Amino acid sequence: MAVATGREYGLFIGGELVEPASGDVRELVEPASGAPLAKAAMGGDQDVDRAVEAARAALAGPWGKTPANERGRLLHALADAFVANRKELAELEARNVGKAISSVKAEIAQGVENFRFYGSAVSSIAGRSNPIGGSLLAYSLKQPVGVAGQIVPWNYPLMLATWKLAPALAAGCAVVLKPDAATPVTALRLAELAAEVGFPPGVVNVVPGDGPTTGAYLVRHPGVDKVAFTGSTATGSEVMRLCADPIKRLTLELGGKSPNIVFADADLDSAIPSSVWAIYYSAGQSCEARSRVLVEAPLYDEFVARFSEYASRVKVGDPLDPETQMGSLISTTHREKVHRFVEGGVEEGAEVVTGGEPRDGAGAFYPPTVLAQVENRMLVAQEEIFGPVVTVIPFEDEKDAIRIANDVKYGLFATVWTGDPARGHRVAARIESGMVGVNMPYTGFPGVAFGGFKQSGFGRELGIDTLDLYLETKSILVSTSPKPINPWAL
Ligand code: NAD
């Protein structure tokens, strides 16, 4: 595969890669090997100013006049460009994040479908007319909210960039996207492809940089009308605070500690391998990772043994090997954090059944880890570990399962495994989370709203309703009466 490593990436502002005013250019490394990957510019305040100006100019210029069907055509063209460049994008992402290329390919395929979904969904953007009676004509217009400041984390840098960009562009917004400082390269390639397929200069701007400085500056920027943030709950809370004074429109996609509930009547030949996938996919660095497996008590020992045996068989290694199922973590620093959680869990009384020790050698590898004898009050069951660590917790009956599932501050996703369809629906309805899978582990389908309850955030991505988060509704009232309007008979 030929891939542009060793390249120096600028910031993407006004339709081209530019030097950073900040002068800050950093070396990026591959987390799976520690080898240098590329150099990338980081934006500072002045760079954010330039990007927001470019976005505002695009809205005031041709982009603001681009009709919905043309925006849809451009999104479909961007989907085609993704397909044409998928090998390069996949290799870049796998090397930058350390993630298995087999996973990255699926994420890119989803990104393509996402552009297509919103490329077609533009035709649904329409106001309505209201029969309010008399001689009044009332109708509404849907207008783009303006410039969207979008912030994404390092765990799915490219896929989440497509989640953010597609509905914003469909709605007619211009965007300044800030990827994480560690993982900017694929979002920059995405911006280049957007320019190549014909998005006018300034519609898509990408300014990587540090969160507390560049990210916070973007959030506070008076030229940004709406903020869409994906990241941790702690940072989301800070972003919400920054949006409060200027009353900015805001959506938050935050952390999770999602339950995976296995009833004794479940088909274990599906439930066990799917539950293994649902935590170790992306090395557990997923907001919707099902990191708490709740198992009906009579099944507990058998389940833990079989789950752990499957977990120890997950192929961990070189992200570029097509056979690899789990790559490295994002950094050795993050791996230390994950390992401290495991050690803390053991101190609280959990038992390591498999994994639990960092792998020797280069690269931020950590093995699939199973913690058994976990109680839901323990820190390992309450906090997002964001690594390949599952906690297995027993429950007594349906009521107990729902109680434990809901006993966390998060509410992003849940999976229920049962042979009783009625119970599947009943439990799904009572779980406090934005999404529930019944006998099905997968997430993230374009057209199916994705987002959280409780401290997992608010607003939804991937859904048709997501368009509304980038649109303002303007009501227009018109008198059609030939008579003069003189309310006080003056
Ligand atoms: P993080 O909150 O540290 O960083 C996320 C992004 O926010 C980065 O781009 C970072 O630079 C930026 N940032 C940091 N501080 C900021 C500030 N003060 N102002 C503005 N921007 C700031 O999160 P992370 O550790 O990089 O990512 C992992 C987290 O993201 C996990 O909690 C995970 O669950 C969550 N996540 C949620 C979803 C979802 O859809 N719900 C998807 C993926 C990841």
Image (spheres, rainbow, N blue to C red):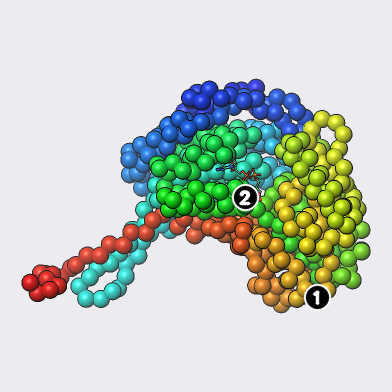
Q: Residues within 10 Å of mark 2 (few under 14, many from 20)?
A: few
Residue 368 got which mark? Answer: none
Q: Is residue 224 left or right of residue 240?
A: left
Residue 242 image position (x, y, % from top left): 49, 48
Q: Alpha carbon of mark 1 to alpha carbon of mark 2: how far?
A: 33 Å
User: According to the image, label 1 marks what residue?
Assistant: 397
Amino acid at circle 1: Asp
Of residues 259 and 68, the one nearer the viewer is 259
Instruction: Confirm if mark 2 falls within 8 A of ligand 1.
Output: yes
- Do residues under tags 1 and 2 come within 8 Å of each other at their CB atoms? no
Q: Which quadrant of the rendered structure holds the C terminus?
A: bottom left
Give the structural element (helix, strand or loop) at label 2. Answer: helix
**In this picture, is 234 found above or below 189?**
below
Q: Is residue 383 left or right of residue 219?
A: right
Q: Which quadrant of the rendered structure holds the N terminus?
A: top right
Q: Is tag 1's residue or tag 2's residue first in the polypeptide sequence?
A: 2
Q: Looking at this rendering, what residue extends furthest in the left direction?
A: 490
Residue 7 image position (x, y, % from top left): 61, 23
- Mark 1 or 2, which is nearer the eye? 2
Residue 234 got which mark? Answer: 2
Res 6 → quadrant:
top right
> Which quarter holds ligand 1?
top right
Does residue 184 appear in this view?
Answer: yes
Residue 409 image position (x, y, % from top left): 67, 61
Q: Residue at x 89, y 71 (%)?
A: 298
Of residues 458 and 483, the one nearer the viewer is 458
Give the structural element (helix, strand or loop) at label 1. Answer: loop
